[in-house]
Image: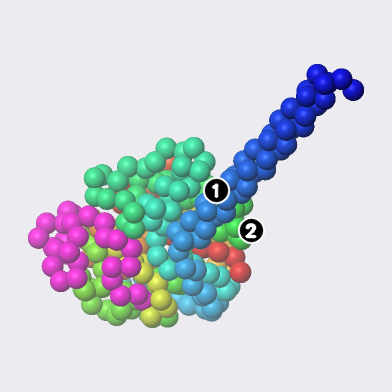
Amino acid sequence: MNSFTSTFMSIWRTASSLMIVALLLTAVSACSQSDARQERLQELMPAMVHIEGGTFSMGDMVEEGDANELPVHEVSVQTFAIASHEVTFDLYDFFAESTGRDLPGDEGWGRETRPVTNVSWHDGNALAAWLSERTGRSFRLPTEAEWEYMGRAGTDAPYPWGSNISREYANYGPNDCCGKGTGIFGRDEWEYTAPVGSFEPSPWGLYDTAGNVWEWVSDCWNDSYEGAPTNGNSWDEGDCARSPLRGGSWTHYSRNIRAANRNDNDRTSAGNGYGIRLAEDI
C-alpha cells in the first residue's frame, strides 16, 4: 500500500468515526429531548381521582331546574377515574404545540394554570386520544351520568357543598342572569376564569365542578331524560351534532352551577366559557 492510499484510508477511518460519534450524539440528544418532554407532560397532567362506582338519582331532585333535567331517574355508574381539575392552558398548549394545532385564545385573561377555554367537543376528544397514545392509558371525556355522579359527590343537594350558593366555594356570575357585575367578593376574586384549584375541593377531592368553565361530556344531546341509559354509559342517540356541557361557568348565574344543571351546544362550538375535564377508564 503506497503512502497516498495509506493516508486516504486513515482520513476515511477518522471521518467515519467522527460521523458515527455525531450520529450517536444526535440520537442521545433526541432521546434526552424526548425524555424531557415526557417528564414535562407528566408534570402537566392533572391528578386522576378514583371514583368508586355506585347508584344515584340523576336529575333535578329539588325542583329548581329546567324540564331537560327530568325525569329524575336512577343510574348505576361503574368505577372510573376523573381529573381533579379542569385541563389547564399549560397542558393544552403542550398538546397543541406537539401536534401542530392552533393555540386557543385566552381573551387576555392569562394562560398557564387557568382552565383552557375556547375549545370544542372535538378538541377535548383529540386531547384525550393524544394523551392515551402518549401514556398508554385510556383517557376520554366523561359521560353525562359520570359527570353528575362526581359533581354531586355523594349528596342530593344542588351543590357539592350543600343547599346554599356561596362564592366561598365557586367562581360564577351574578345571582341573576347575566354578567359578573358586582358579584366579585369573598373567595371569588376573579372577574373571569380562576386558576384551577383556587377553591376548596368537593368531598370527593375534585376542584371547580361548580363554576369556572363549562365542561364538555361525551353524550349526544337530548331535551329530556326520557329513555336515557341507566348504566352510566354515554347516550349516543339523539342530536349527535350537539353535546351537553356541565358545571356552569365564570359568567353564568348561580342556578347554572347546580350539579343537575344542563347546557348544550354544537360540538364545533368553542366559547370562552367552554373547557375540558378528562376521565379515564380503570
What is the chief secondary structure element of the magenta stretch?
A: loop
How dense is the environment of label 2, judged by Cα within 10 Å: few (below 14), some, or many (20 and up)?
few
Q: Is residue 245 visible?
A: no
Residue for point 52% across, 58% down: 39
Amino acid residing under circle 1: Gln
Which mark is in front, 1 or 2?
A: 1
Q: Residue at x 28, y 68 (%)?
A: 198
Image quadrant holding the N terminus, namely top right
Residue 152 higher or lower than 213, as above or below: below
Residue at 71% across / 30% down in the picture? 15
The image shows residue 218 at horizontal and vertical percentages of 50, 55
Q: What residue is disc 2 on?
A: 136
Q: Which residue is mark 1?
A: 33
Is 201 magenta? The answer is: yes
Exactly how many numbered labels are in the figure?
A: 2
Residue type, label 2: Gly
Q: Quadrant of the C terminus?
A: bottom right
Q: CA distance from mark 1 to mark 2?
A: 20 Å
Left or right relative to 270: residue 171 = left
Asked whether, in this view, residue 166 is left or right of residue 264, the answer is left
Q: Is residue 85 left or right of residue 241?
A: left
Image x and y of residue 80, in percent: 56, 70
> What stretch of residues is rendered in magenta?
174-202
Instruction: Please check the rendered image and state whether residue 84 is part of the magenta-colored stretch, yes or no.
Output: no
Who is closer to the viewer here, 213 or 68? Answer: 213
Mark 1 or mark 2: whose residue is earlier in sequence: 1
Determine the residue positioned at 59% across, 65% down. Answer: 281
Compared with 74, 215 (above or below) is: above
Residue 234, picture quadrant: bottom right
Which circle marks residue 149 in the picture? none
